[in-house]
Image (tube, helix red, strand yellow):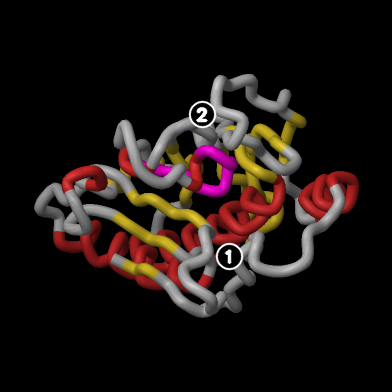
Amino acid sequence: MPNAAPAPGLGPETSSENCLSRLRELGFTLEPAEPPHTRNAQCQIDVPIHLLSVPVSSHPQQTVVLKEKPILACAFAENFGRWISDLAAPVIAGRMGIDLVAVRTGPGFECRNRNGSPTGKLSAHAQGRAIDVSHFELSDGGSLFIKPNGNASHADTIATLRRAACGWFTTILGPGSDPSHTDHLHLDVEPHGSSDRYRICQ
């Protein structure tokens, strides 16, 4: 398995210019995003961007598109993009013999509490440090859905991606975790407790 990237937000902060330059050097396609205007002052993103596409590390001429153009914090976009580039695309190609062409997601940033609750802790989405993945679009025109559909081969591939995501993210939630994550994979980099090594992988 490729080396996982350290989860952003758990180490020294990087400047806006450095982060954007690094993503472009990695071959990411992105657009700067306007800081969201919300009623909750806690909903703030550090260097917001729209992530449009990432190259596949083993085949740099091949790109994976983010059709929803999610708004993400720049540092989180690097982790998410590298997970696609270094893990998701190679695993799907190796296990299924099909190229990954697009990852379908939610909007990224959402100013809300965890699980959309009216009370409680703010979600990592509220800082652009989380993403929800619903499915993967493949080069044969098919799709690989996070929600179980009875296809054992698909379920095995999703399980591999889900387990390995623990190297890139601090929280991984999906079908079976709770009623809020029955049809998508939630990935974020929120720290848990005092250790940057603690992971919630469900």
Q: Residue 134 magenta-drawn?
A: yes
User: Residue at (34%, 51%) from the top-left corner?
Assistant: 185
- Quarter of the image for residue 73 reads top right
User: 147 or 124, which is in the foreground?
Assistant: 124
Disc 1 crowd rating (10 Å Cα; few below 14, some 14-19, many 20+) is: some
**Which stretch appears magenta?**
126-136
At x 62%, y 46%, the residue is: 63
Vertical relation: 190 (above or below) 24: below
Q: Amino acid at mark 1?
A: Asp
Element on which disc 1 rests: helix
Q: Which residue is mark 2?
A: 68
33 displayed left or right of 141: right
Q: Position of 134 compared to 17: left or right? A: left
**Circle 1 residue:** 86
Q: Nearer the viewer, mark 1 or mark 2?
A: 2
**In this view of the protein, can residue 194 be seen by the observer?**
yes
Q: Quadrant of the C terminus?
A: bottom left
Q: Is residue 98 above or below residue 200?
A: above
